[in-house]
Every structure is written in C-alpha cells, then in structure tokens.
Image: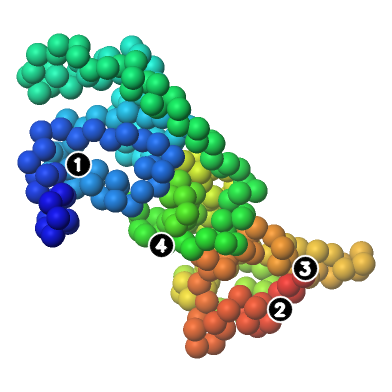
Amino acid sequence: IPSGSTWMNEVINNLEQADAFVILITRPSENSVWVGFELGYYWKKSNKARIYALYHPTATIPSPLDTLQAKLVINQSELQDFFQRLSIDLQLNYSGNANIEYLIDLASALSVRPPERSLANFERLVETSSWDKIHVEGCDTWICADDVLFQIVSSNENTGSEPYEEDWVEQFPSKPPARLYEVNLKVAGLTIEQFFFVTLDSASYFVPMPEIEWTNNSGVRKFIWRRSSLIFKVAKIVGIFNPFRYPTIEDFAVAAGIEIVD
C-alpha cells in the first residue's frame, strides 16, 4: 500500500480486482476481524467462487470456511494440489516452480501452541472476556471477543409444549406463560455444555432455571442459584432483567424468592 494513500480504499480495490482469494488459517488469523472482513467481502463479491483455504495444523477452520476443502500447509502433496488447482482455475500453466519444501519449512517452524478449548477455559472467558451479541438464524448468539470460536447460543424454540410451572414463577403472571429454553455453550460449533433458562413476564425476564433443595426433610422446598456456578456467570451475559423493576439478577432473586448461595 503506497505511503499516504487511504489504506482501506486500497484493500477494497484489491479485493474487487482479485481473481482469487487464498486464506491461510493460523491461530492468529482464525480470530482476526480483518481476515474475516476481507473473506466476507470477497465471498459476496465472487458469489463464493475461487476461494481457497490453507491451514496450519494448530488452527481450527472456522465456519463457513469449514464447508470448503482446505489443504494442510505442511503437507507436500496437499500443497502441490493447491497450486495445481489454483493454476487450472485461473487458466494458467502450472510449471511447478513454487518452492514447496521451503514453504513447508516455514510453516513447520511456526511453534504455535494449540488452543485450550475446554469447558474450564470457557468459564474463564465468561468471567474475563467481553461478549458481542448477534442474531444468527433466529438465535441470539454471544461471541467471545478473545476467541470467536467460543459462543453462547440461545435457542429460538422452547423445550416443549407445556409451560414451566413452579412456585416462584407465580409472582410473575404473564401471557404467554413461562417456558424453558436451551442455552448452549459451543466451541467451534460443538456444544460442550447445555443449560436451561426460563422466559417469563412477556419476555421481560430471561433467567437461569434455579435448583431445588429440600429443607431438613420437612417437605419444604427452596429455590437457589449458586453464585460460583457457570450457569449463574452465563446469566450475567445473556440474562434479561427489567431495568425499571429488577435491573440485576440479584434484584430479581429477591423478588422471586430465589436464594443466592456461594
């Protein structure tokens, strides 16, 4: 990009003029906003044509690139196949001049530690990262700012035809009645944990389904949320609370008679 030029215009112009788009998926690029922007721009401009993906073994291929056949950048035959296919699609003669061995050596030298995509790391990110809400295919989805493959997805359909009926819900009469919805924690599209949330009072509230405990075998039940639980922490991100009546989960718990314990 020439010095003093408007770099954004240069990026757009090059994307417009490009005959093909090659994305190298590494640990840094899989979470890059700009790589995603450029891919999305070319994806729409080309109607999904002539997009090629090379990936490093430590990286995860994000959606929608996982629908394309990607080639492993440290594998000689796959890299050779990539150059041949690119040449054929661009109607060029493939001379085999690419230094495959040199490229493989460079890629193999990348000592990137595979990401920890565990439930424990999910909980850490829930506590420490920011989460951006988007609407995808009818579902509310929260995407982790530190790793976009960590997502919290709220189902757009309740879990059954029967209303959710418990004593604490009766304090929030509404039409339609309270119902259960799934909230799934996903990593790279795979669900690693599932919770149930309750929507009530005409969707003014969306709260985690509380646990039920019996008091000293007396037959008296109490409803509790555990402050240290992952579902309670997730509720801080995805929960809905009436800003004028009960703006926080703690305020709501008092009104609903739900006890918050450590």
User: Residue drawn 8% across and 18% down?
Assistant: 92
Q: Are marks 3 and 4 in contact (CB under 8 Å)?
A: no
Q: Nearer the viewer, mark 1 or mark 2?
A: 1
**Disc 1 and disc 2: Cα gap in Å?**
51 Å
Residue 105, quarter of picture: top left
User: Residue drawn 52% across and 77% down?
Assistant: 241
Q: Are marks 4 and 2 in contact (CB under 8 Å)?
A: no
Residue 43: assigned label: 1
Residue 262: assigned label: 3
Q: Pick whichever, 222 or 183, lies toward us.
A: 183
**Disc 4 and disc 1: Cα gap in Å?**
23 Å
Q: Nearer the viewer, mark 2 or mark 3?
A: 3
Q: Which residue is mark 4?
A: 133
Q: Nearer the viewer, mark 1 or mark 3?
A: 1
Q: How many marks?
A: 4
Q: Pick whichever, 66 or 17, lies toward us.
A: 17
Residue 14 in the image: x percent, y percent? 12, 44
Mark 4 residue element: strand
Q: Pick whichever, 116 or 79, lies toward us.
A: 79
**Disc 4 and disc 2: Cα gap in Å?**
29 Å
Residue 67 in the image: x percent, y percent? 32, 32
Q: Name the residue type under label 3.
A: Asp
